[in-house]
Amino acid sequence: MFTGIVEEIGHIHHISKARQSERLVISCQKVLEGTKIGDSIAVNGTCLTVTAMNSSSFAADVTPETMRRTAFSLFRPGTPVNLERALRLSDRLGGHIMMGHVDGTGRILSMEKEDNAVNITISPERKWMRYIIEKGSVAVDGISLTVAERTESTFSIALIPHTGSETALLMKHAGDVVNIECDYLGKYVEQLLNEGPKEGLTMSMLESLGHGGHYGV
């Protein structure tokens, strides 16, 4: 799991492409500290497994499924990427819990400066909009952000100077594609509601759980 607090901006050093997959070599420094083969690192919000590493880079394999879900196909040597090592139980949770499993992509519609913030409006795939709520959390290229505004087809975030300087998001432009991971809690709630009992709370349900007598129902 991850928190969406980017630790370092790395750069794509080399890409080995197959028909539907690819192998990335990413230049970096900080996220290599304490990292070993088999560890997870989020690259623009996508959880990848370290398969090789040296003192200045690591390699990771990208599956066809990840290629379909993300903007990785747009990577070129030199592309800046947001990097974060997996969460440790002793870490502060500065952002929000993220799985590193990107739902899909979104396109930046506009980037407008407003005093000390940059307001970024993004249009994701429509099917993911139901998980995006105003003042809720969303991950954009692996960055934990708060939804400032929401319409039926877009959402906006207000990027503060610190986040802008510590991530690669301000290197993007209107028209660029970003990775989107929605808050997973909404997805779990939806599935539970869809797959749960249709008759609501009943006496037989309480009795089956052993609670009927305790509540005096």
Image (tube, rainbow, N blue to C red):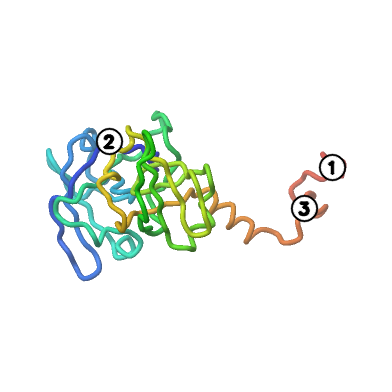
Residue at the spot of label 1: 213
Residue 114 picture quarter? top left
Looking at this view, is 113 or 79 the one in front? 113
* Numbered disc 3: secondary structure: loop
The residue at which mark 3 appears reads as 201
**Marked residue nearer the N-terminal end (2 or 1):** 2
Q: Is residue 64 above or below residue 31?
A: below
Q: Nearer the viewer, mark 2 or mark 1?
A: 2
Q: N-terminal of the two: label 3 or label 2?
A: 2
Observer-nearest of 69 and 138 = 138
State whether residue 41 appears in this view.
Answer: no
Which residue bears the numbered disc 2?
165
Mark linked to residue 26:
none
Which amino acid type is marked by label 3?
Answer: Leu
Query: Residue 157 placed where, x, y %?
Result: 43, 44
Residue 2 x, y percent position in the rendering = 38, 41
Q: Position of residue 91 (x, y in %)?
A: 39, 30
Marks 3 and 2, how far apart in space?
51 Å
Badge nearest the viewer, 3 or 2: 2
Q: Nearer the viewer, mark 1 or mark 3?
A: 3
Specify the amino acid type for callout 1.
Gly
The three-letter amino acid code for the residue at tag 2 is: Ser
- Residue in the picture at 49% in, 63% down: 127
The quarter of the rendered structure image containing the C terminus is top right
Do the numbered discs 1 and 3 sit on residues whose CB atoms are within 8 Å? no
N-terminal of the pair, mark 1 or mark 3, is 3
